[in-house]
Amino acid sequence: MLTLTIIQILQVLLNVAWWVIIIQFVLSLLIAFNVVNMQSNFVRSMAYGFDRLTEPLYRPIRRILPHLGGLDLAPAVVLLGIAILRIVLGNIALSVVGGGI
């Protein structure tokens, strides 16, 4: 039962990470296309905060990926990794609940 609880906690953390990356991506697009004003302290602090949260995830991936100019594929790679981890955790949870079938 403890294993299932740990898996569920990890799934919640992966969901939070997923949404943080999505929000950071959308906010960066809004900033890039001048939809939101970076002169606003609130917008600037939000962008800075999300960048600080996501940068540790992106940094190792950016070292591996080739430089594509203005296109950053690191968020897509992280989201793909999170999706794969969700599948793996779901299968582990099923095997735990099903008694290792």
Image (cartoon, rainbow, N blue to C red):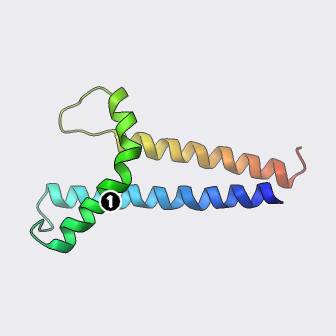
Q: Which residue is mark 1?
A: 50
Residue that appears at 11% across and 61% down: 34
Q: Residue 40 lies in what quarter of the image?
A: bottom left
Quadrant housing residue 72: top left
Name the residue rendered at 23%, 67% in the picture: 45
Q: Is residue 89 above or below residue 6?
A: above
Element marked by disc 1? helix
Looking at the picture, tell me which residue is in the foreground, 72 or 10: 10
The image position of residue 35, as x and y in percent, is: 14, 65
Q: Quadrant of the C terminus?
A: top right
Q: Position of residue 20 (x, y in %)?
A: 41, 60
**Residue at 23%, 30% in the rendered image:** 68
- Which residue is located at x 30 percent, y 62 percent? 49
Relative to 18, 7 lies left or right: right
**Quadrant that contains the N terminus:** bottom right
Counting labels gives: 1
Q: Position of residue 83 (x, y in %)?
A: 54, 47
Quadrant of residue 37 within the rendered picture: bottom left
Crowding at dot 1, Cα within 10 Å, few <14 / some 14-19 / many 20+, comes out as some
Q: Amino acid at mark 1?
A: Phe
Residue 38, percent from left and from top: 12, 65
Horizontal side, residue 56 vs residue 97: left or right: left
